[in-house]
Image (cartoon, rainbow, N blue to C red):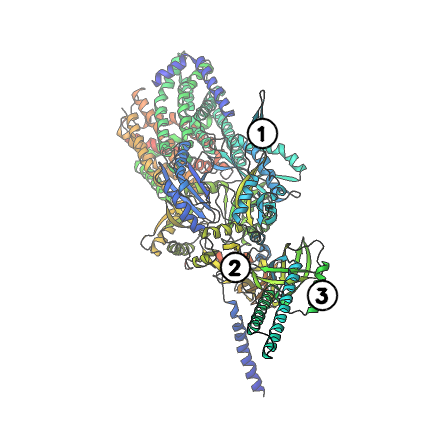
Amino acid sequence: MNRCLFLLSTLLWLFVPAAVSAGDDDDQPAPAGGATPALSPEQQEAVGVILAHPVKANVAPRIEAYGQVLDPATLITDTGRAESSRAAARAASAEAQRMEKLYSGNTDVSLKALQGAQAAQIEAQSLAQSIASGFVLQWGPLAKLSAAQRQNLFDALGSGKTLLLRADLPGRVSLGAVPKSATLDVDGVQVPAQVLGMLQRGAADLQSVGLLLQVDHAPAGLGPGARLPVTLLGAPGSGVLVPKGALLYGDQGAYVYRQLHDKSADGKLQYAPVMVKLLQPSGDAWLVAGLDDDELIVTHGAGVLWSLQGLGSFSAEEEDHD
Amino acid sequence: MLAAIVRASLAHPRIITALSVLVAVLGAAALLNARFDVFPDFAPPHVLVQAEAPGLDAAQVEALVTRPLEGLLAGTANVEAVRSSSSQGLSAIQVVFSRGGDPYRQRQLVTERLAESSGLLPSGVGAPLLSPLSSSMEYLVHFGFTSDTLSPIELRDLVRWTLKPQILAVPGVAQAQLFGGESRERQVLVDPFKLSAAGLALDDVRSAAQRGTELIGGGYVETPTQRIVLQAQPAGATPEALAQAVVTTRNGLPLRLGDVAAISDGGEPRFGDAMIGGRPGILVETSTQYGANTLEVTHALEQRLDALAPALAQHGVQYHPALLRPASFIESAIAKLRNSLLIGAVLVVALLLVALRDWRGALVSFSSIPLSLLATVWILTSCGISLNTMTLGGLVVALGVVVDDAVIDVENITRRRRGAVGNVDIRSLFVSASLEVRQPVFYATVAVAVAFLPILMLSGLQGSFFRPLSIAFLLAVGISLLVAMSATPALCALVMSRHTPHQEAPFLQRCKRAQQRAIGSLHGHPRLVLALLLASGLAGMVLLPLLGARLLPDFREDYLIAHASLRPGISLAETARVGARIAERLSAIPGVKSVAEQIGRSENGQDPDAPNKSEFEVQIDPAQGYTATQIEQRIRHTFDDFPNQLVEIYSVLVERIGETLSGESAPFFVSVFGSDLDGDDRIASEIADVLQGLPNSGTVRLKVPPRQPELRLELKPQQLGLYGLQAADVLQTVNAAYHGTVVAQLNQADRSVPVTVRIAQADATPQAVGALLLRGRDGALVPLSTVAELQMISARSVIDHEDGLRRQVVVANPQTSDQKGYAAAARKAIEAKVKLPPGVYLRFGGAAEAQAGAAHELLLHSAAALMLIVLLLALAFGNARHVLLVLTALPSTLIGGVAAVALTGGTLSLGAMVGFVALFGMAARNTILLVSHYDHLVRVEGCTWGLQTALRGAEERLTPVLLTALLTGLALLPVAVQLRQPGHEIEGPMAVVILGGLVSSTLVSLLLVPPLAARWLRPE
């Protein structure tokens, strides 16, 4: 038994450091090139290098968009046109059925009249479909509303308490998930808005993806046609937050410096660059992937290490881009 | 002719004395109004041409701006070198002309050539500008301003528009460069969404901003009796007014700038910054006009700034004077030299009184000093030569020689009077006594002058330094000769004719007795005497090269400059942050008075530095209990804690002189030339490895820095076509977003503010660049990443050229006093270990190389001078044995100089080398006086040649030879004793060499030459 324990402990003694060493493999990549930068504690204090653990976070992406307050009259008109076209189609259909019944009953209805009624039915239905399609393209999310819901919306719009807003994302022709919420910047005041859904018709002048927003507590005076910045909040992503000042950019992407566990032969603290994937900015920080929150990264003074690494590693072998 | 001058002077002693007084008064007046400077104008005439190329990277600047301009400048007359540096947004070309030319004409030639550049440079690149013509030192005074109440823009406004005109109004100020703060610009920040929604393009905004601020004269209204001028004012003078400028009209309603852009005042893009004592501020660097009096201009400028300081303080602006002030060195050096001159003069008077035992003789002898030196100053200033440490050094060295001529005359007159029996005709005695020594003194003085010719003929930087010294020396010696032939006999006739001189000083009598015994003993051993002469001469020649050699000594200045380089591509803010921490630590060192940091460059400044480079200007005060060396060591130690930057610390003078020599401050460097930049870098790295392997290499670095990260933007032609975009429009939008386009200048009463159109950017990251929106066909917005490939790359931050060829430079700061030895070892090691590929070649440079060149030149010229001296001796003696004896005695004088240098722990600096050359002249003078007296005894007094005559001649010449040696020694003693004091760095080693050499040459002349002469000479 004792012999087994001894063997086990010997194996552990042999392999655990190796495993730890293998775990340090991520110390190796050096996107900035050159030797591992190292600083003595005095030097670190002198140059003002500050270390901290990155903070785990779920951050919703903020998408800047350009909003325009829509005219409710257009919606009401479009809705009326859609409903009247549907009614007209229904009426034309009923008339065609009635004519067909009369004609088949050998009543005094000519074939010409029947065919006329049928043609009118098809025309009315086509018109109704066209108008309905146009409505869906123009007001997509509202097309799914029931009549009652729509009436409530009209009432709210009519009172001026609610606004509909089209938010365009210029330069984008597609959008993944529909953002959950949005805020409007009305003369510096942040006003919440509800994202009703994506609009299928792009704005011809902006060539952009559009979203329909509903603002339930609109500031007074904000009328149709007004243009204002909108920030859309997407689905939160998870990662760690690092200050912008900690990030450096190289030809392989963004990276931060983290402190290595082992000191150099002359007792200096060593640092290694770690590649990170930038997810999204969040204030003065970036949400990034590729870092653990237990790692000690350089949050202040990363430029010192970058400079140290660059000055100590000048090589003519770098790829020529001249 | 010499006799005629002497006779005329003795015939009209009062007139000659009155003339002498008049000359002295004129000299004194010239001295009071003289132009003082640190050094003579040592820099060759040069012109710095700079062209701003906003938005272009180093490789683009090289190809599009630097090469065309170099092409234009190539072939300009008298150009010695064309050096250029292409960096982000700036092409800086330095055209160095041959020395001795007219700088104004040379500038004109460059201007004419550059006039053709307008069609060669790409649009957006500014016209090439010439930096103002300034003195070699360039630096006048650096001072700073900080404020707790004013913003960086307000502080810069105050300095730029209120103070700078007053600074430039001071006569002699050539330029005032501003670092730090923020330059105001009126920013039109365009919202791309609003712009697109309004169906407008960036051009519309640019045009509207331009027209909104344009000022067009109104003309005038003429009534039958009056002409009334219409004074038009631009509408957009304020941000609010500019916001109302109409861009276009839609449906009858105006669309204004404010509808699509935010208008406010902000800071221009910055390429430089400044920290004063670790705080952000404005650093003002002034330079001296070519030929201006540094001291006078400094005082005038400081007077003006001191007068402004109280008013500035009321606005919450603190004035930081004298952050770098070369005038302090001038004041200190001149004060030290003046003291040395005075102490030397007092010692000379004391010795004259003791040796001659006659105040009249001492007065006559001494009077030659002020008379000769003041007359020299008069001539120097009349020729436009400034009084600087070199010309004053020449006068110090001349002090000993100047008094010699008079002393020889006075001593001979006194000796003859002592020997006169009965009623002799005093006037005849004076004439014969003066004439007796006139010819040997003349030839001896000419020999000294000829010995100085090699120094006068030095070329390059060393020539620029030592030519004024040798001119001052030669003038003083020449005038002293004239004084000795005119004023001295005249004064003797006035004050000494009715006076019987005292007996000779007892110590001289004892010296004579000892000399007689020594000669008597040595006379029996001629071979021993010859062996001693040859052995001492040989030993001197063998030991001389073993002394380490360096061109320039360490200057003891109150200011140090630390050049710091961070990695290229570092931000200005990071450089400033680290700089503030360094400044904080430096300021805490006892003995450090002030610390200022200059980061990057100023607009059209002298230094085309990138934001990764900074200069710390540290003022030290050794009076605070620490020596300058201790303070400097602590400063160097402080930088050890900042390993993220390469640091080189120089005194101000060494920095300026080094850059003048070769464009580099370092004492040793190797330029690698080749068209393949990577190949150059590879070879340079190998050379750097070789140098680092050598002992005492100090800091070794590559001058052209490593690459910096760049975001390459490559447009996709197909995508551009798809969105109806033109490449130039895309690039203009990018430029507007990340640099800004200046569309107009808003001219106000006393200032002008650029109006800049920019695209508002939410986030300044590489990712945000791809999201930049472009306005495509039909007004659609397209992100930049759709039409361009964006890739982070590493590219060159700086590309250097010399004479049109690409170059990399390896720089070393050897930590040894023997820089020449280091350079030789480095050269040998590089040649052995580095194999050069075809098309790559090396050029070695730096102070060590210059020192070797100077030594070589000095050796060649000295050989020619030696030939001249031989001819002169032949002319003087007409006897080959006489000439040979003088020449045999010469080399043995070396040993004293070598011993003196070795004892003082010095190295063979240029000053010491000049000392050796001067020493030869002085040694020849002693032997000439002795040998010519032997001739006189035999030819005039009818003595028979033999040991007795040789003993008599040696005895009679002991007093003048010993006296002149002692006088020269005492005159130079204060300089030699203060060897390591400011102002004595160059003359100090020279004085040490002369002092040591005088000991050996005097011993040789008095003890070894007479016994040899007794055996060997055959006077007729």
A98 sits to left or right of B655: right
| Three-letter amino acid code at the position of disc 3 | Asn
What residue would you read off at disc 1?
Answer: B230
| Percent x, y of residue B194 | 59, 52
Q: Return the residue nearer the eye: A247 or B785.
A: B785
A308 sits to left or right of B840: right
Q: Quadrant of residue A73?
A: bottom right
Which element type, helix, strand or loop, lies under badge 2?
strand
| Three-letter amino acid code at the position of disc 1 | Leu
Earlier in the chain: of badge 3 and badge 2, it is: 3
Which element type, helix, strand or loop, lies under badge 1?
loop
Foreground disc of the pair 1, 3: 3
Q: Quadrant of the N terminus of chain B?
A: top left
Per the model, the C-alpha gap separating discs 1 and 2 is: 57 Å
Q: Quadrant of the C terminus of chain B?
A: top left
B724 sits to left or right of A82: left
What residue would you read off at disc 2?
Answer: A249
Per the model, the C-alpha gap separating discs 1 and 3 is: 65 Å
Q: Is residue A58 visible?
A: no
What residue would you read off at disc 3?
Answer: A152
Tags 1 and 3 on a common chain: no
Foreground disc of the pair 1, 2: 1
Label 3 packing within 10 angstroms: few (<14), some (14-19), many (20+): few
Please give the name of the residue rendered at 66% of the width and 37% of the height, measured from the top-left corner.
Answer: B313
Q: Return the residue nearer the eye: B846 or A175.
A: A175
Which element type, helix, strand or loop, lies under badge 3?
helix
| Percent x, y of residue B537 | 34, 39
Residue B799 to residue B491: above or below: below
